[in-house]
Image (tube, rainbow, N blue to C red):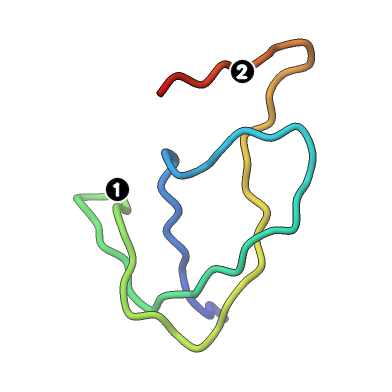
Amino acid sequence: MLLGSVWIPLRSIGHATEEGPGEWWALNTNVFTDGSEICGAENPTLHQILLEVFFESPAGVNIVYHK
C-alpha cells in the first residue's frame, strides 16, 4: 500500500557528519513527471513521515561553503 510520495530536491539537502533530529515531510498523492523523470509532487495528504536526509562527507574531507 502506497501512502504517498515526498519530493526532496537534491539542492535542498545539506551535508552533515552526524544524525540530527530529522524533519517531518508531508506525503503527497500526485507526482509531476517530465517523461520518465519525477520532478515534483502535489496534493498533500494528512500523512507525514519523519526523515533524516543528508549527504555525509567522506572521512577526512572538509566541506567549504561559498556564499
Point out the image quarter for the C terminus.
top left
In percent of the image, x 57 and y 81: which residue is there?
1
* Vertical placement of residue 39 versus 31, above or below: above
In percent of the image, x 32 and y 53: which residue is there?
38
In percent of the image, x 41 and y 47: which residue is there?
9
Q: Mark 2 sits on what residue? A: 63
Q: Position of residue 32 (x, y in %)?
A: 26, 62
**Splitting the image into 4 quarters, where does residue 17 fall?**
top right
Q: Amino acid at mark 1?
A: Glu
* Vertical placement of residue 25 versus 1, above or below: above
Q: Position of residue 63 (x, y in %)?
A: 61, 18
Which numbered circle lies on residue 37?
1
CB atoms of marks 1 and 2 within 8 Å: no
> Which element carries disc 2, helix, strand or loop?
loop
Q: Position of residue 56 (x, y in %)?
A: 69, 31
* Vertical placement of residue 22 versus 1, above or below: above
> Which element carries disc 1, helix, strand or loop?
strand
Q: Amino acid at mark 2?
A: Ile
User: Mark 1 or 2, which is nearer the eye?
Assistant: 2
Residue located farthest toward the left when viewing the structure as drawn? 34
Among numbered discs 1 and 2, the one appearing first in the sequence: 1
In percent of the image, x 31 and y 59: which residue is there?
40
Q: CA distance from mark 1 to mark 2?
A: 30 Å
